[in-house]
Each structure stands twice: as structure tokens, then as C-alpha cells.
Image (spheres, rainbow, N blue to C red):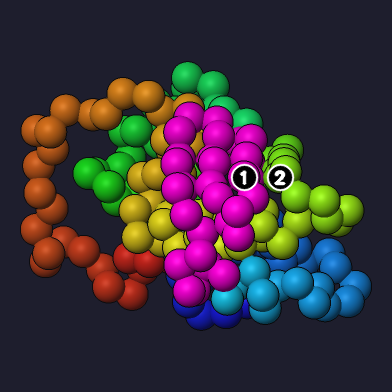
Amino acid sequence: MSGEFGTTVWGRDWVRLAEPTSVTRPDSRLPKARSLARREQVHDVELAPGVVTASVDGHRVRISVPQWDHATLDLARDKGRGDDLPDSVHAELPGMTDVSADCDCKQRKNPCLHALATFYEVSRRLDERPRLAVLLRGLTRTPAATATRIPLGLLDPATFYGD
């Protein structure tokens, strides 16, 4: 797993969609998919509750993400501040199962190269703004902007980003 994608547990979930640990041999498409994301060739990316859409090399990608129930969304909403969502919350929430990707290309393998590149791009975006992980799972309203700031002295740098 490359160090530029999946630097948080939230982004790592999306890298694992592209690079599952259960594979028995390397996927020759992964370097090209990472390169497409790295060179900003994944365009028109939209993250909305339950869906990610993007355009890669002229092909439209649509990724469906199962939404969480209200209790799970409330838990995630209550634990986060602003765009941040502590890595410690990750263990309390359901994992990335039943994610499906569709593309209008003719590649037989699923997920295709374009979907893989989109996985990497979503990973990078979640690394930058972990709160987007909750948006993808069904959060539709934003919390009030009255959140209090956390003094830096209260943060533990050793555990701030998890593992």
C-alpha cells in the first residue's frame, strides 16, 4: 500500500477496496489506477449520501455505498468536530461492505481501472476531510457551526491519527 493514499483509517478503507488483502497475486492495473489519481485524472468527483460519481479518461464511474442507520450516523456525528472525525471512532462504526462500482467502459474486470482510480481519489479526499466518510454513509445535514475548539494541549500527537 502506497504512503500517499490511505494515510488515515478512513482513506485506508477505500485503498482496501482497490487492494484487498485476500488477493493471491498482484493486480497489474493498480499502478495505472494510482497514477491516474496522482496525476489528477479523476475529474468531476461528487460525493453524496450513498454514492460517488466521477469521470476518468472519458468514462463515467458510479460507486454505490451502503448507508448507515440513524443511530450509527448520530454516533459518528456526535464524535466529530468540523471536517475532522477521530480515527478512534472508526472502530465503533460498520466497515466497508457491499460497496459496488459501475462504469460505462468495456473492461470485463470489476472493479475496472476507472473505478480503481476513483477509489484512490476518494481515499485521498477522505484523508484530507475524514468527515466525508459520514456524508457518504448518509449524513445529509451539517452540524451547527457552534462547535467549540479543542485546545492543542489536550491532543495526544501519538494517538491523534490512530495506528
Q: Residue at x 64, y 35 (%)?
A: 64
Q: Is residue 28 left or right of residue 91?
A: right
Residue on which disc 1 sits: 60
Return the residue nearer the eye: 152 or 97: 97
> As shown in the figure, which amino acid type bears the numbered disc 1?
Arg
Magenta stretch, residue numbers: 36-65
Image quarter in which the N terminus is found: bottom right
Residue at the extreme top: 70
Q: Is residue 106 visible from the viewing direction of this image?
A: yes
Q: Residue at x 72, y 43 (%)?
A: 104
Cβ–Cβ under 8 Å for marks 2 and 1 = yes
Residue 100 lies, in percent from the top left, at 72, 40
| Location of residue 68 with respect to 101 vertically, above or below | above
Q: Residue at x 54, y 22 (%)?
A: 69
Residue on which disc 2 sits: 103
Q: Tell me which corner region of the image, top left, top right, bottom left or bottom right, holds residue 141.
A: top left
Mark 1 closeness class: few <14, some 14–19, many ≥20 residues within 10 Å: some
Q: Residue at x 76, y 56 (%)?
A: 112
Residue 92 lies, in percent from the top left, at 52, 43
Residue at the extreme front: 58
